[in-house]
Amino acid sequence: MKQLICILAAGLLWQSANAQSYRVTGKLEGLNNDSVLLIVRKSNMAFDTLRTRARAGKFRFTGKVNGVQQATLVPGGLRSRKFFRFYAEPGNITLAGHSDTMDYIRAYGTPNNRLQTEERIREREQYAIVKQLRDEGKTAASEKLYDEIWAAKRAIIRQHPNTMVSVMNFYVLASRVPLDTALALYEVLSPAMKQTDFAKDTRQRLAKRETVRVGKPAPTFEAVDMDGKPVSTAGLKGKYVLLDFWASWCVPCRAENPYVVAAYQQYKDKGFTVVSVSLDNDGKKWRDAIAKDGLTWQHISELKAPDEPIANLYGVQSIPDNFLISPEGQIVAAQLRGEELKKT
C-alpha cells in the first residue's frame, strides 16, 4: 500500500512539474457583475472548478493545465443553465460575445481555440443555408452542402492531426462515416492525440462497431417503449426495421426526422417499420419532440443519456445514427441520411 501511495504521489508531482499556465480573459455583454464559473476537465473523473465575479461583464481566470483540456464557462452560476465550451491550454485565451447567445461566443489566442472558433463560425453560416434550402424544397442542394460540412471536419483532422479540435471531430465523425473511414481517420491523429481520453474511448467504440458492420447479425435487445409495451428484436423479425438513434435536443437529428417520416409513410404497409431510441434525459422534452415531429412509431428511452443501453450495445458514438435490419435480423445498411433512406 505504501508503495502504491508513493507511485501515485510521484505521478502527481510529475504532472504538477509539467503543468503550464493559462489565462482566460473575457468580456460578455449582458453579464454585468454576475458570478462566473470555469470548469476545467483534468480526466474522466476529475475537474478543476474556478470561481470569480465579473465587473461590467469582464472577468479573468488563471490556472495550470497539462496539455490541452476541455473547459466549460458558466456565466451567472449553475442556475443560469448557460454554458460555453472551449479549450484550456497554455497561453492567453480571449473570450468575447454576449451572455444570452452562448453559441456565438468567440474564443481566440491559442491554437485549438482559434481553430475551433473558425470552424464554429463557418458551420453556423452553413447550417443556416442548409435550413433555408430545405425550407425551399431544394433537397439536393441542401444535402450537398451538408456533406461539405462533414468533409471539412475530415479535412481538419488531416491538416491538424496534433490538435484537440481534430480529436473532437474524430469523436463526432466516428459514427457518421463508414467504419473503415473512421478507422483511417484515427490513424491520422498524432501519437499524443491518440492517447487522449476521447480518442481512446472512441477507438473502443469503433471496436464495438466492428461487431455491427453491414452483413453482421443485429445485436438483440429487449426493452419497453414509451407506452409501456414490450419491444424486442425477436418480435420485429419478419420486417425491415430502421433502428434510429436520436434525441430531442439534437438539431441534426430533428432535421433528419422529416426524411424518416417520409420513408415510414411510404413503406409502412410494405413490411417496413421504425424503432427510435432516444438519448434524452428529459421525458417531457422527448415526448413533446415526438409529437411535434409526427413520429408515429415505437419509441424507446431509459432517459439515461449518454448511458442509453441500446445505444451502447450498438456502439453509437454520436447522433443521428441508424441501422437498417433485414427481416432475418441482419444489418443490411447503416448511417442512412436524407433521401438515401428511401433509396435504400
Image: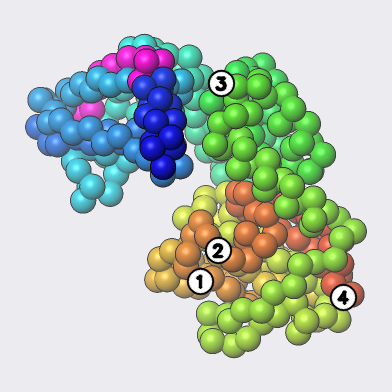
Task: Estimate the spatial distance between the alpha carbons at disc 4 and disc 3, rounded to whole Å.
Answer: 44 Å
Q: Amino acid at mark 3?
A: Thr
Whether 79 is among the magenta residues is: no
Q: Identify the residue position indicated by label 2 in the image.
A: 308
Taking 185 as reference, is 275 above or below it?
below
Q: Is residue 176 left or right of residue 8?
A: right
Dot 1 amino acid type: Glu
The location of residue 6, given as percent across then percent down, is 39, 31
Residue 215 in sight here: yes
Magenta stretch prevailing secondary structure: strand
Report, in whole angstroms, how far the alpha carbon at label 4 lies from the one at label 1.
26 Å
What is the magenta range? Answer: 16-29
Mark pair 2, 3: CA separation: 29 Å
Q: Residues within 10 Å of mark 3 (few under 14, many from 20)?
A: some
Q: Which residue is mark 3?
A: 163
Foreground mark, 4 or 1, reads 1
Q: Is residue 177 left or right of residue 122?
A: right
- Callout 2, which amino acid? Glu
Kind of element beneath mark 2: loop
* Residue 327 image label: 4
The mark found on residue 302 in the picture is: 1
Residue 211 on image: x %, y %: 80, 56
Q: Is residue 344 left or right of residue 311?
A: right
Say if the magenta span includes residue 20.
Answer: yes
Give yes or no for contact between labels 1 and 2 (Cβ–Cβ under 8 Å). Answer: yes
| Secondary structure found at label 3 | loop
Instruction: Check the image and name the residue furthest to the front.
Output: 2
Q: Amino acid at mark 4?
A: Pro
- Say which element carries label 4: loop
Q: Badge 2: few (under 14), some or many (20 or more) residues near its Cα, within 10 Å?
A: some
